[in-house]
Amino acid sequence: MNEIQRVEEKFGILDRVPVGACVLREDFIVLFWNSCLEDWTKIPKSEIVGKNLGDRFPHLTQPKYHHRLQQVFEGGPPTIFSSQLHKHLIPAPLPDGEFRIQHTTVTGVKSFDSKGFYALLAIEDVTDLTRRLQDYRSMRDRALEEIEERKQAQEALHQKTLELEVRQRELILLSEMSDLLQACLTIKEAYSAIAQSCKLLFPNIPGAVFIINSLNNLLDVVASWGITFSSQKVFAPNECWALRRGRVHFVGNMQNGLICQHLHQNLLPAEYCCVPMMAQGKALGVLYLCTPDKGQLSNTTQLLAMTVAEHIALALANLKLRETLHNQSIRDPLTGLYNRRYLEESLEREVYQAELKGYPLSLIMIDVDHFKEFNDTFGHEAGNQVLRQLGEFFQKNIRPTDIPCRYGGEEFTLILPQAPLSITQDRAQRLRKKIKLLQVEYAGQSLGCITLSLGVASFPQHGKTGLAVLRAADVALYQAKAAGRDRVVSAS
């Protein structure tokens, strides 16, 4: 399988997202070009994959682009080409002859030979958002002209001015919210930013954002603001009319309106609305607004809520995609544990922190005894089942601060920050004893008892560098296997 095929296999899922995606090699050769970019640029994948992107778009060889892309190829942090400064990084025409306004994030992705990085370009079409902002500004300008033309109608002019100020404030806050969400690195950060931004966008209207939990298909509250909260914090999707209908559901009369089942019947608000949050044709959750006084959820406020919901849904979908791609680069797909590359990066970081702050750091090297017999007796898929069960076992029996990794084959490594040698020895012994209680079955057949050989080493007793401590733990593991297996040996 050549390099292009491997890249296509790894990033093929991006063919199904409404975001342009392109993978570049350091020599600017295109390794992946998704369907969205085909539609936008009218350049078929077959005509550009394997070719130099600069041949199609010579402006990318200019220093202002080339220098920032080169930093990504060298493993630098992600770089963003803002739509305000770089509208057409990869020019894509619209049906009306104009060009799409794009927001591009370039992220380094480790190459297959682990000697360099690819550049993953994620290109968002923000044309509609920009045009909406222009519409808002046009509305403001028209209103200001009316103020000059109708000086006699002082009261009407005053009201129009107040409305314009509100719209302008909303524009600024929307822009600030977008910037905050684009700067978030994790979903948890985004939830905090959403709560902060919505509190400012809806200053007198309590509300919340609910996200559908993929594990149990229930909506959980992830951000809330205001004093009165009249909805349940967890509910099923069919309890919300907005999700059932796929559109905004507003109730202004609680006596005659069709009320969602997730509202507390003894704490009903004066009026409320639910706005479904959609991304890639799929419901992500609901933006919920309620008020104790009638008239606050005007048509304008509902339109603002729809715009906010669109921003939130798009940002969360992009973050989930980014987290998925990041996890794929650092996780072992079979066990769910961290891979060896992440082990080496984490060990270097943890040793630096331990040396800086003066606390110990320990490693446990683990080998599954007689693992070859599982494969020879029950088949390789049964062996894979053993490794999967071990991955779950380690994740359930370590601290949240510990770092479990698959070192290779049937070997595992646990990094234990702030753990002295004596405590690490005890924990290794507990793991050794507890693993014998693990019952692994494959195809309805028990695979028998699992035993482990474990080697323990600590920083700085057994090495001044992470690599030295890792080698010491590996030597101790070899000694445990040579002494008969099913035992813990500490480095000497």
Image (spheres, rainbow, N blue to C red):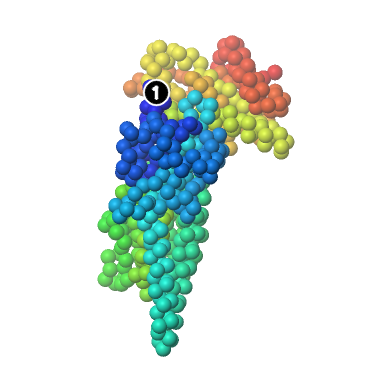
Q: Residue at x 37, y 52 (%)?
A: 99
Q: Position of residue 306 (x, y in %)?
A: 36, 61
Seen from the viewer's position, the closer of residues 339 and 105 is 105
User: Residue 293 appears in which quarter of the rendering?
Assistant: bottom left
Residue 133 in the image: above or below residue 46: below
The reply to whether residue 322 is visible in this rendering is: no
Q: Amino acid at mark 1?
A: Asn
Residue 133 in the image: above or below residue 488: below
Q: Quadrant of the N terminus?
A: top left
Farthest residue, direction bottom: 152
- Along the horizontal axis of the image, is 479 left or right of 411? right
Q: Position of residue 5 (x, y in %)?
A: 37, 27
Q: Position of residue 457 (x, y in %)?
A: 65, 24
The reply to whether residue 34 is visible in this rendering is: yes
Q: Residue at x 55, y 22 (%)?
A: 366
Seen from the viewer's position, the closer of residues 32 and 220 is 32
Residue 56 in the image: above or below residue 289: above
Seen from the viewer's position, the closer of residues 174 and 117 is 117
Q: Residue at x 51, y 42 (%)?
A: 62
Q: Residue at x 46, y 19 (%)?
A: 449
**Crowd rating for badge 1 (residues with CA inside 10 Å; few <14, some 14–19, many 20+):** few
Q: Secondary structure at mark 1?
A: loop
Q: Residue tagged by mark 1?
A: 2
- Along the horizontal axis of the image, is 159 left or right of 355? left
Q: Quadrant of the C terminus?
A: top right
Q: Position of residue 51 (x, y in %)?
A: 39, 32
